[in-house]
Amino acid sequence: MPPAQLQLHPDRLLPADPGVRAVARRLHEAVAELPIISPHGHVPAQLLLDDEPFADPASLFVQPDHYVTRLLHASGVPLERLGVGRGPLPEAEARTVWHELCAHWSVFRGTPVRYWLESELADIFGITVRPGADNADALYDQVAERLAQPQFRPRALMSRFGIEFLATTDDPCDDLAAHRKLAEDATMTSRVVPTFRPDRYLEPARPTWVADTRRLAVAADTDTGSYAGWVQAMAVRRRHFIEHGAVSADHSHADAGTAPLEPVDAERIYAAALRGEVGGEEAAALRRHMLLEMARLSTEDGLVMTLHPGVARNHHRPTFERFGADTGHDIPVRVEFTAALQPLLERYGTHPDLHLVLFTLDETVFSREVAPLAGFYPSVYAGAPWWFLDAPDAIRRYRSAVTETAGFTRTSGFIDDTRAFCSIPARHDMSRRLDCGYLAGLVAEHRLEEDEAFETAAALVTDIPRKVFKL
Amino acid sequence: MPPAQLQLHPDRLLPADPGVRAVARRLHEAVAELPIISPHGHVPAQLLLDDEPFADPASLFVQPDHYVTRLLHASGVPLERLGVGRGPLPEAEARTVWHELCAHWSVFRGTPVRYWLESELADIFGITVRPGADNADALYDQVAERLAQPQFRPRALMSRFGIEFLATTDDPCDDLAAHRKLAEDATMTSRVVPTFRPDRYLEPARPTWVADTRRLAVAADTDTGSYAGWVQAMAVRRRHFIEHGAVSADHSHADAGTAPLEPVDAERIYAAALRGEVGGEEAAALRRHMLLEMARLSTEDGLVMTLHPGVARNHHRPTFERFGADTGHDIPVRVEFTAALQPLLERYGTHPDLHLVLFTLDETVFSREVAPLAGFYPSVYAGAPWWFLDAPDAIRRYRSAVTETAGFTRTSGFIDDTRAFCSIPARHDMSRRLDCGYLAGLVAEHRLEEDEAFETAAALVTDIPRKVFKL
Amino acid sequence: MPPAQLQLHPDRLLPADPGVRAVARRLHEAVAELPIISPHGHVPAQLLLDDEPFADPASLFVQPDHYVTRLLHASGVPLERLGVGRGPLPEAEARTVWHELCAHWSVFRGTPVRYWLESELADIFGITVRPGADNADALYDQVAERLAQPQFRPRALMSRFGIEFLATTDDPCDDLAAHRKLAEDATMTSRVVPTFRPDRYLEPARPTWVADTRRLAVAADTDTGSYAGWVQAMAVRRRHFIEHGAVSADHSHADAGTAPLEPVDAERIYAAALRGEVGGEEAAALRRHMLLEMARLSTEDGLVMTLHPGVARNHHRPTFERFGADTGHDIPVRVEFTAALQPLLERYGTHPDLHLVLFTLDETVFSREVAPLAGFYPSVYAGAPWWFLDAPDAIRRYRSAVTETAGFTRTSGFIDDTRAFCSIPARHDMSRRLDCGYLAGLVAEHRLEEDEAFETAAALVTDIPRKVFKL
């Protein structure tokens, strides 16, 4: 039997009903080729600065992508065999990694990972057959051959992908040299900016916190021996980021809690933390106070504040100890926003310079908390479906849960949040197809006129992300 | 370019699939003209007693409706500019309010507010163009002109809307004079009854509670100096309401908790509360005991008990302080019924005279708690989707989540819960269209015969609400 | 008017869209006749050993089935009138029970109970008219007549149903004599095996626990005077079950908590419990330690571990006291897996011999916790929708919520979990129809090729349950 074909159907992800699909197709055609705005993701600036060829299919598609490796691991392939936590491998090992992916192609059925990989293989690398154990080597060769060509280097791809704006994710102490060089490079037509991601500095019970605080002092040239100094150092580094183009600060903690401390208590807990003598509860109290402070700084310096709470990181300690973080076992937990954000919103919720984008892995808050908050506070936006929820059915559930209370203009526009560079166009296109399908459903049920659907479909990928992220 | 048309498509909200839609259309035709039963809402009796013309489009459609003003506020229009918290405005200001609505018409895309407003403008006021900044003044004139005509006064509209039964929401101390006069008025063909809404009297930590309790003593002519007296006064006022036609008592607190106190403890906490010396925890304990008492009274006097828990009221304190309650920033929180209601249901759950209707803004309890409770206890009914969930997609999720465990007969029938008088027919029609669509889906999948779907569609707007609310 | 027909449409439960339905029909035809694997349920082995005729329609369809009696009870029929908690009734009473079911046929509209009953009546008993008060007696006669025929005895039906594998649910102290005899009976072509269900022995605060522990000591011929002895006795009984064919151990507690105790603490609490002196908190701590121990034993003896947490059992105490357990008022509560299972998964989550299948009545964990866990840990499987969620719309929500993160291969395959013997084929067929419908939707949206959908539809009822339950 010949291997099955791999073909991207032009109507993929559009609603099955022929009438609705016809509308969705028209909408999609109108937005399919619009440039990509990617206001939050994990592509390293260095990748674009170096513009070196990607090493091989394994390090491009498998090893660093925990979306891919986790389901292979669940299917019985040890992470070690997938080269997790290592850079590019010797060719024989890289082929093994790639072979595992192809041999387990069927376990990805029905997942967006499968969808993205298919899109990338077909659209970028010209693959026309379905991967499997039998053709893994041939496909490896075909991808590897392309990767060696100049038009498959990162910058060429970025241009081909139509990426107009790309934000990376960076440590507050980063000197942002790569970003500066990119900005100075006249050949770069896209805008690449850093994102201020200070989580570790807001976690006083973290083993590395004292050292992190010291690094922060050096980077900011500011004494962080007191809480007031820490705030000052943060403000300095935020300015540094803004000077290098940053538009947002990203925050991810166990919960979304914000709660003010009296200045004297903040200083006391901070001092205890510097001595390594802070308990879990006080550390959390200080973190919630610090997060509130970050919101205050946003009202001053204008950085958009994005919030990604509710993940139990590194759930399987043995895997973490062996392979490090971001290796597929971060597991979501319940989230609460209404009470957690009240202190923040009471203070800054109607401040004209605050933009607060709320992301969640707990779908229950979409209709219960996120949409009601975004539907009242001019500062609050419902962030796009994130991570495990960045998938066709989940995206539909998101639009269904959020729109009726908050409309479209109170949502963030699509966020790819990815470190898988080649998947960016497929992810954005997936989102566009699903939004067009949702809008087409509204049109088909006479809840929206088609001219409005066209306008909304375009706004979701242009005006809306530009406004939310102040581009 | 001419302004876009505003037309209500006859198939609006019906499922897109042509086969399913055909069934849904037949079902809807059979129930579209049936009278409206509205067992819970917020239209004031005085409005119908006075029967004065509505003042102007702004005070009719915008100022008092937090569904409308909240999304305008989120879109950057200050509540002050929308006349929130004020009565009818001078014409120039009223036109400004109306203009803000029209100019922001697009932010309501995909929301039920947009759907209701369109229905009202087209069906009641004969508007045929889509509102926008350009035509705001002309539309204002057209609506205002109609409002001046006798057939647009409240009673004439009520008759035109086909409202057979309308319940208002009233304070236990209300003398219900307006209701009495309406009942005595032979020209009123609809039945208008009060609803007993005692929340504030069950919240001993509320700043006004001591004064409220004193007012209650006066209204009931009963000494409320002891807990036993408070119970007695409540019973007296419930009888007063029943004598004026009330069929239900409505309760809304932070949680659905019910838990008995020993009589001595109830008296002790009550006495402390009267002295203004009650803590938050004891106040909540007394409230949960009081709610249990309300259920006991329902088994005696037969008032249907409706429960609407789980909203953090007045989330944004500065807005509350300036504009008052019900101004768009009540935000839902998680809800729990299974444990919270066990004390109540253990005592009264199989009592033949108790009807307990459960509403929620936390959709997670539909399949997990509400339907299982309503599917066992003869007293419990799953209340219709409420507030933020009174919207097409949410109503579908409700039917999908509830029906498989509790069927249709254990649900409450539609509840509009609105203070927007002119939206009542649009809301009920929306509900009917969606229920017909859901039933049509069951027919199309051969899970229900069409004759049963017809019977069920009719029962949902006739027998079922009549039985649940003892009409 | 002649009574309505009762007919099973060949396309029942398949998606309404004609194009999608055509694919779904093809998929269903390919799997409709495959044998039934039932790895978890509540049919008693004795029923098959005795192979006596079923007594009458009431005791077969109504009395013992809390899915049926609960909604009748909610509709005002006292459980006493339904013969709940009693065995077969005198004919007049049995006819009354049956009559109540038929007279209340309409309250089951839209529920899976109605669907299963229709399937059973039509497919097994040749009923061709819709039940109702008018024809209840005639239908009783028709069913009763068939029940008297040899081809309607349990074993004949089991063979006709195509049940290849059936697991019962059994107490650890059960001698499993019925299972042994069934295994020795050469005329039994199906495999019938016990399931180890030790819940009561893990609940030290339960009134019967001390006595249960003593029974365990006798059954295991092991001293259970110490915690170490209890573990040993458990291990002995598990081996006894395995020798009689058991493949899994089933666990259902209020929560899914697992947490290790120091050995000295386990012994101390265990000793206190034996003296009847254990508090609720310590009892829960010991239970969570014991559950962890059960996982450890599973890594040793290979029994699949199934977990069904999150139900408040016997919610209405008066009904429990009069009619016993499993009488329709077990009500779900919120569930949490991420933190609760971390101790277990940190220890055994990557152990090659552990299979842990997670069931829930709280749908919120499907996308938030269950799929992420099953998508990383090779030991974890997402259990099929359970109990209140074993219904068409809920099954669709389950596939939608789980597949995008965990695919199909990390799910358990269908579990009927029923004591209603005659409903087994209808339940499995329902699941197959819905899975085929879901797969057809993926095909229609070009998210999956049709050959893969065929393979997946078949795997879901063959390879997948066989692998998950080690058959």
Image (cartoon, coloured by chain):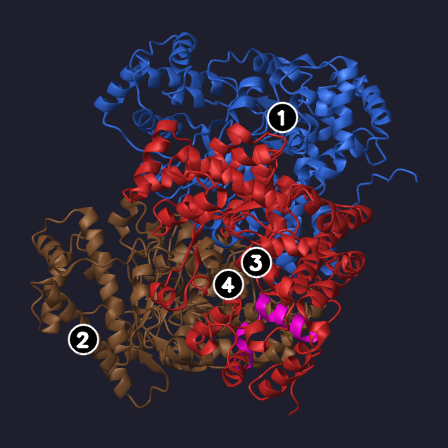
Chain colours: A red, B blue, C brown
Q: Which residue reaches farthest right?
A: B1
The secondary structure making up most of the magenta span is helix
Q: Which residue is mark 1?
A: B419
Q: Which residue appears at 26% of the width and 88% of the height?
A: C184
- Is residue A214 at all visible to an observer of this figure? yes
Q: Nearer the viewer, mark 2 or mark 1?
A: 1
Is mark 3 in CB contact (under 8 Å) with mark 2?
Answer: no
Alpha carbon distance from label 3 to label 4: 26 Å
Q: Residue A210's x, y, as percent?
A: 36, 47
Q: Which residue is mark 4?
A: C402
Alpha carbon distance from label 1 to label 3: 48 Å
Magenta-drawn segment: A102-124
Q: Quadrant of residue C175?
A: bottom left
Report the front residue among A298 and C96. Answer: A298
Q: Nearer the viewer, mark 3 or mark 2?
A: 3
Three-letter amino acid code at the position of disc 2: Asp
Does dot 1 land on a helix, a strand or a loop?
Answer: loop
Q: Which residue appears at 65% of the width and 26% of the height?
A: B65
Report the front residue among B467 and B160. Answer: B160
Q: Which residue appears at 34% of the width and 19% of the height?
A: B231
Please say if B136 is above or below A235: above
Specify the subunit that label 1 lies on.
Answer: B
Q: Which label is found at residue A42?
A: 3
Please say if A222 is above or below A27: above
Q: Quadrant of the C terminus of chain A?
A: top right
Q: Which residue is mark 2?
A: C175
Q: Are marks 3 and 2 on the same chain?
A: no
Q: Are marks 1 and 4 on the same chain?
A: no
